[in-house]
Amino acid sequence: MVLHQFAVSSLSSGYENIVSHEFGHAFADLADEYFWRGQEAVNMTKTSDSSTVKWNKWIDNSGTGIYKIGVYQYGTSGDEAKWYRPHQSCKMRYSSSPFCAVCSAEIIRLLEQKSGDSISTVDLPNNKIGITNFAIDYSGNLSIPLKINGRYVTSIFESAFKECADLTSVSIPKNVTNIDYNAFENCTALVSVSLSSELIAIGSSAFKGCSSLRNISMPNKVTNIDSSAFENCYSLSNVILSNSLISIGNSAFKGCASLSSITIPNSVSHIDSSAFENCSYLQNITLSNKLTSIGNSVFKGCASLSSIIIPNSVQYIDSSAFEGCSYLQSVILSNHLYAIGTSAFKGCSSLGNI
């Protein structure tokens, strides 16, 4: 039995507050904001950076004092010190308090989703608005409006267009800065996406499973591509990365079997594990000259890769980084390489020069 799946209430005084707190758990899967265990949730994360935390769109001008949205540590030692909440006095911490803006938005999103409306939004600070849900039976080409109800659209929330299986193209307006996790996941007919010129972050699994997507060109303000953002986009053959890109998350392009070449911009210092694993048609890779490490299984299973130049900035090649690159014939290693991990070049049966 997993106890947190069940709402618990009481007949004692103040039961209304207990009911609404437990409703937050049962309906919206909100985490407690007092610490009893760590779990990634809408209102709980290990990310401490206010610019990339999942509720960053709420941080500006969203209350004052203890009511201001921010990034607050659960505690100062042990596991508590590893986790962060958006608010200091939310109902998910103190049942007598109101829900904070982050938790309220998630509850509203789910209520609107279940109501069957074709498009659902939530108001944000500074006369902005975010899209939270869209009808899953939408088909064809979609141009997201610049404004809704007089407010600029700046965010596409988590799962907003998830499994819109007949959606073929999307144009995202210029003021959108964030595409949250799972936003377009499994939009299997999606062929093309025009991204916002102001886009900064692409969330985890944002386009995962968009198996018809062919090209993606990232605006130069994009700094983060989160884990599995384009995983299993089997038709993705052309990717242009942002020159401001800092990080490429775990499995970001894993399984992109049509991708033939990739240039990692010089702003990138680390590529996380499995980022390009099983990109079986990947033939040409140009690595960043500021790259310091290549993570576990980053290019594992890239069976068409014939040669690779590791820049002199690279100090570590982690385990299985190039495992199963069966056509790899030539490797030029960094002059400053300190360590090569276990099975880094395992199964590279064609390798003659290193």
Image (cartoon, rainbow, N blue to C red):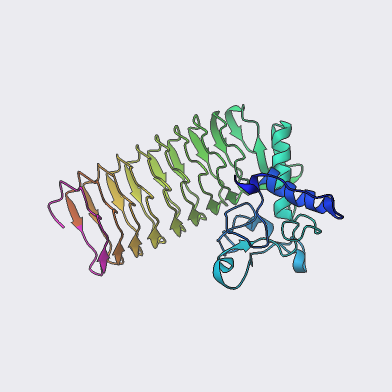
The verdict on residue 51 being magenta is no
Residue 164 against residue 20 in the figure, above or below: above
Of the 4 image quadrants, the one containing the N terminus is top right
Residue for point 33% across, 42% down: 279
Residue bounds of the magenta highlight: 332-354
Q: How many callouts does the rendering have?
A: 0
Q: Residue 305, image x and y in percent?
A: 24, 45
- 142 with respect to 28 (left or right): left
Residue for point 26% across, 69% down: 338
Of the 4 image quadrants, the one containing the C terminus is bottom left
- 52 with respect to 269 (left or right): right
- Outermost residue, bottom side: 76
Q: Please state which of residues 147 and 42 is positioned toward the viewer in this rendering.
A: 42
Q: Quadrant of residue 315?
A: bottom left
Q: Please state which of residues 228 and 43 is positioned toward the viewer in this rendering.
A: 43
Q: Can residue 129 be spotted in the picture? A: no
Q: Can residue 31 be spotted in the picture? A: yes
Q: Residue 32, image x and y in percent?
A: 67, 57
Residue 308 against residue 111 in the figure, above or below: below
Residue for point 52% across, 33% down: 187
- Outermost residue, left side: 352
Q: Please state which of residues 255 and 37 is positioned toward the viewer in this rendering.
A: 37
Q: Please state which of residues 77 and 44 is positioned toward the viewer in this rendering.
A: 77
The verdict on residue 350 being magenta is yes
Q: Main secondary structure of the magenta part?
A: loop
Q: Residue 167, image x and y in percent?
A: 55, 30
- 46 with respect to 22 (left or right): left
Q: Residue 207, image x and y in percent?
A: 50, 41
